[in-house]
Image (spheres, rainbow, N blue to C red):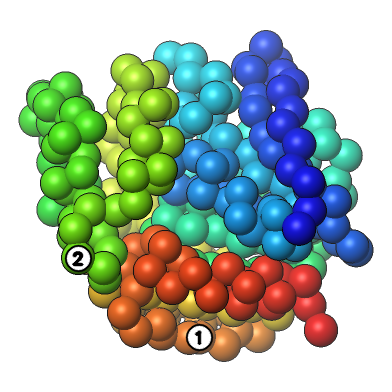
Amino acid sequence: MASVAEHTGAIDELPVFWRSAPSPGTPTLYLHGVPTNADDWTPFLERGGGVAVDLPGFGRSGKPGHFDYTIEGYDRFLERFLALVELDRVRLVVHDWGAVGLALAQRRPELVERLVIVNAVPFLPGYRWHRLARVWRTPILGELAMGATTPRTLRLISRESNHAPGPLPAAFLRSVTDHFDPGTQRAILRLYRASPSERLARAGAALGSLGAPTLVLWGTEDPYLPGAFADAYARALPDASVEHVAEAGHWPWLDRPELIGRIVEFAAGP
């Protein structure tokens, strides 16, 4: 098991937090979604090494009001982050809104050696936001929903996110609630409101330019992102295979821990 280190730095005075562990060959960059942070990826780093960053607005990274919480804003941030950690090539793993990494990958496909897409926001035609996202996208209603989100309500909401009965694991929920401050709430609202369905489709217009070997892995019991979009991602990418994982939800590795090894091994390559 690799030893995982914690790091802090800054990009134009924006505090940035990330974790890393030694890896053979090209490092894997892990990108989390909403509302989590790099804690998602600690068991992956322990297994195969790599780098996992808290995206701006989440976890221990900065959450300033002036940051551009859009697909384009995260695209630019990730390019600057790779320069900060001196990586000119990565193996990329994205989950949920970690899909923002696909924007950078399309703009600079030479950066990505291998790619894993896990229950990611569809940068594809035809997606319509799920119920909770529609609430967040609605002015005033979204702010009220954020204000009403407590550890108890988060536990209740999380019951629909996984296959196992009951809420998501306590350690996972604690990681979310520890960092679910007004800065994170603002980042979520701005990101969702800047991302109507047609904008998501445009964000994936150049997926065909990504020639990296790709695994699309999808928990079939995801209440937010239908499995049909796993197949759509695989069709849009030139060298992709798809695996639909039964008895697994939105964070499929929480229901099926063996998927950690599957993802790490694919990212590492043959």
**How far from the left and from the top, in percent, is residue 243?**
48, 86
- Label 1: how many residues lie within 10 Å, few (<14), some (14-19) or many (20+)? some
Left or right: 33 as drawn, with respect to 213: left
Q: Quadrant of residue 65?
A: top left
Question: What residue is rendered at 88% in x and 39% in y?
Answer: 86
Label 2 sits on residue: 165
- The N terminus lies in which quarter of the figure? bottom right
**How far from the left and from the top, in percent, is residue 16?**
65, 25
**How far from the left and from the top, in percent, is residue 247?**
31, 79
Label 1 sits on residue: 242
Residue in the foreground of this view, choosing between 224 and 60 = 60
Q: Quadrant of residue 232?
A: bottom left
Nearer the N terminus, badge 2 or badge 1? 2
- In this rendering, the answer to whether 148 lies above or below 1 is above
- The label shown at residue 204 is none
Q: Is residue 219 visible?
A: yes
Marks 2 and 1, Cα distance to the nearest angstrom?
A: 26 Å
Left or right: 143 as drawn, with respect to 14: left
Q: Amino acid at mark 2?
A: Pro
